[in-house]
Every structure is written in structure tokens, then in C-alpha cells.
Image (spheres, helix red, strand yellow):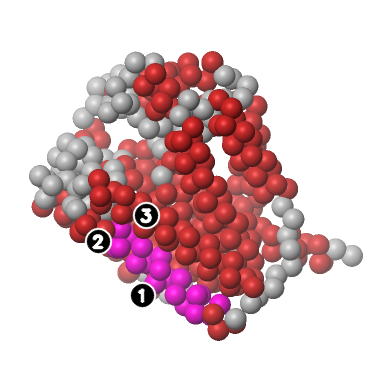
Amino acid sequence: MKTGSARFERALPWLLGAWPIASLGAEAVGPGTGTAIFTILGLHYAVAGILIAGFFLSKLSRPVRAHRSKGLFMLLVLLLWALCVTLLNAQNLVVGIAKLGELSAFVILGIATASFSRGAGEEVFLKAFRALAAGLIAALILSMAADVGFRDVFENRRVPGFVHIRILGFSATIAIAITTAWLVRAEEQQQRWLPALLLCLGWTVLFWSASRGGVLAFIATFAILGAFLAPLRRNWGPWLAALVTGFGLSYLVPGLGDTGTQTMFDHDLTVDGLSTGRWTLWEQTLGFVAAQPLIGHGYGQFHTLAVSAGGLPETVMPHSHNVILESALAIGWPATAVLGGLVIWSWIKWACNVRRDTSEAGLASLLVVSTLLIYALVDGVYFYPESALAFALAAGVLSASSARHQLKRRMTRP
């Protein structure tokens, strides 16, 4: 059993590094088609399943003292509440149960990651996160090149290896978060060229994808965390240099439609124009929430409600582009307040732990979680497996670190 655990630990970086490249290769079944989309989604779920099984099975060979978490208990209660509301109120029960099942799977992945990390330690994830960042950026660059070279195959907002251009943006922010931690914690100056190069390339793709939300989310994350994490403050110069270099390089890559850096600035100077229609979308969502403010409509119901209100199925967004409104729509305002309090409490605890012990894996996890949380205020990072998988891994690592710090405090008490 110990041999199996060691093998999984060695295989983990290869699995996470190969995952983005494999998603790009999945286009071979039918470039730009629905078949490719289902193949890519199936691959994401398969990777999540392998990780869950591997983490739990590895734990069997490394017994760890059980850790009781009030936060996890509250999260499971909220999931149960979401299931009840979905069963009672959902207009589209099939979509609601399917999306809730997907969400639950990634919660289980987070629990499995935390359980594994408590026994194995954060260092196991150092190579795994680096491999994930390198694999993501390689896939992002290849996807960008293929999109430019085969425009007639990948129409509208579809890009090779990614269901939507914005998901490519989500993935770029995840890669940037991990490589920032890699750059900051590189032990020697000569070891910094690789993370610096990857960081430049990550910013290049993010700017080219015209993901304004992603750009602003990570800049805000760096500013907030940099205020009380000295390692980030000390490295703001190289980080900013990578951002500026990536911005310049992105202009060398041609864009069309929703891609291209210049697209970020081509908007009317109105609230709705600058928000790319999100202001109207949020007003519509608030109208739906007002119909069921206390208990909500069930999970994953925005598209169905918008179509029922007269929207065309092919033009209506699948989600509200705001995690707070999406939560209120699904489970009501009271439960959303509880969920919001849980998220804030967990984030503060995780950030304090990283400040006490700024390991690379811990910093990378905090950067990923913080960026995606801020990004979720303006886009649907909470709605897709690519970002949910990375969030679950990062949250699991941070939860395990928090449990270890809590155990140490108990053991040192007189």
C-alpha cells in the first residue's frame, strides 16, 4: 500500500501537467464540434475522478488523525439545502441536479485533497502545481496559435481545447497565480528564468483573450495579498515587468471577434458597455431573486428562468456572471449570507496561515483561491470544471495547512 501511495505522489505532477495538453488533444475527435466539447468535459471529470480515488486510496497507507471542521460541516449543510431547494423549486430539474452533482464532486475533490495533504504535506503539491502551470501555459499558447491558424474551424467564442474563450482566460489566471508563487519563492536568482518566462507567456495569453475580469482580478489579488505578505511585496518589480512584457507581446498576436488585446478597449463609455452587458444581466438576476428571496429557485436555473422571461435560448447566458447573485438565485439570501461568511472566515484563516509560513505551495494555493473568488464577482468561474478543479485542489491544500497549524497550537498548550 505504501508503494502505491509513493507511485501516486510521483504520478501527480505528470497527471496535472498532462491534463491541459490532453484537453487540447481531445479536439482531434472533431475539431470545433460538439463531440469535441463532450470529450473535453469528459476528460475533466475523469481527471477529477482519478484525483479523488488517488488521494483517498493514498490516505489508507498513511493514517492521519481525524480533523473535525466546523467549516466543512456548514458547507455540507449548505449543499444539502441547495439539493432540497432544487428538488422543490427548480424549473429545470435535470440541469439543476446535474450541475449540483458536478459541484458536489468538486467539493469531494477538495475534501480528498485536504485529507491527502494533511498526511503527505504541502511539498507533494509543489512539483504538481509547477507541472500544472507549465502544462496550462503550453496548452494556452498552442490553443492561441491554433485559433489564429484555423479561424474557420473554431467559430464564435470557441477556442481549441477550451469550450469558451473565457474559460481560456480562467485557465490563464490560474497559471499566472501559480507561476507568481514559483517566481517569488525561487531559492536562487538563476532558478527564476523559467517561472519568469512562463509568467510572461501567461500574461500574453490572458491579454490576448481580452479577459478584462481576469486581468483586474489578478491585479487586485496581488495588491490585496501584497499588503500583508512580504514575499509578494519584495517581488513586485519582476511581476510587473512580466505583466508589461506580456501586454506588449499580446499585441503581436492577431485577434478576431472576441479575441485580441485591443478588444478590451473597444467598448462604449457607459455602465452597460464597460461591463459588457453585465449590468443589465445583474438587474435581470435581481428580478428573478426577488421572486424567491428567502429560499431561492434551485441550482443552475438562470438560463431556464431567462428563457421563460422571453430570452432566446441560443443567446441567453448560462449563468449570471456573479457568484453572489448566483448563490442568492439558487439558495436565497439567508443561505447566501451564511455561505459568504464561511468563505470570508476561511479566507482570513488561510491567509494568516500563509503569512506565518509562506511555502510555495501554500502561496500558490492562496493566489489561485483569491484570484478565482474575485474573478467570480464578474464572471462564471464557479460554473465550469476547469476552474472548479483548480479551486478544489488549492482550497484543499489550504485547509490541510490550517488543520496542521490548529493541531500544533493544541499540542503546545500547557
Residue 410 in percent (x, y) is at 81, 62
The answer to whether residue 283 is visible is yes
Q: CA distance from mark 1 to mark 3?
A: 40 Å
Residue on which the image places disc 2? 25
Task: Say which amino acid is labelled 3.
Answer: Gly
Say few, some or many: other residues with alpha carbon within 10 Å of mark 3 (under 14 / 14 to 19 / 20 or more). some
Residue on which the image places disc 3? 42
Q: Which structural element holds mark 3?
A: helix
Q: Quadrant of residue 196?
A: bottom left
Q: CA distance from mark 3 to mark 2?
A: 13 Å
Task: Say which amino acid is labelled 1.
Answer: Gln
The numbered mark, 1 or 3, whose residue comes first in the sequence reads 3
Residue on which the image places disc 1? 190
The numbered mark, 2 or 1, whose residue comes first in the sequence reads 2
Q: Nearer the viewer, residue 402 or 13?
A: 13
Q: Quadrant of the N terminus?
A: bottom right
Q: Which portion, as a residue range, is magenta? A: 5-24
Q: Is residue 192 above or below residue 337?
A: below
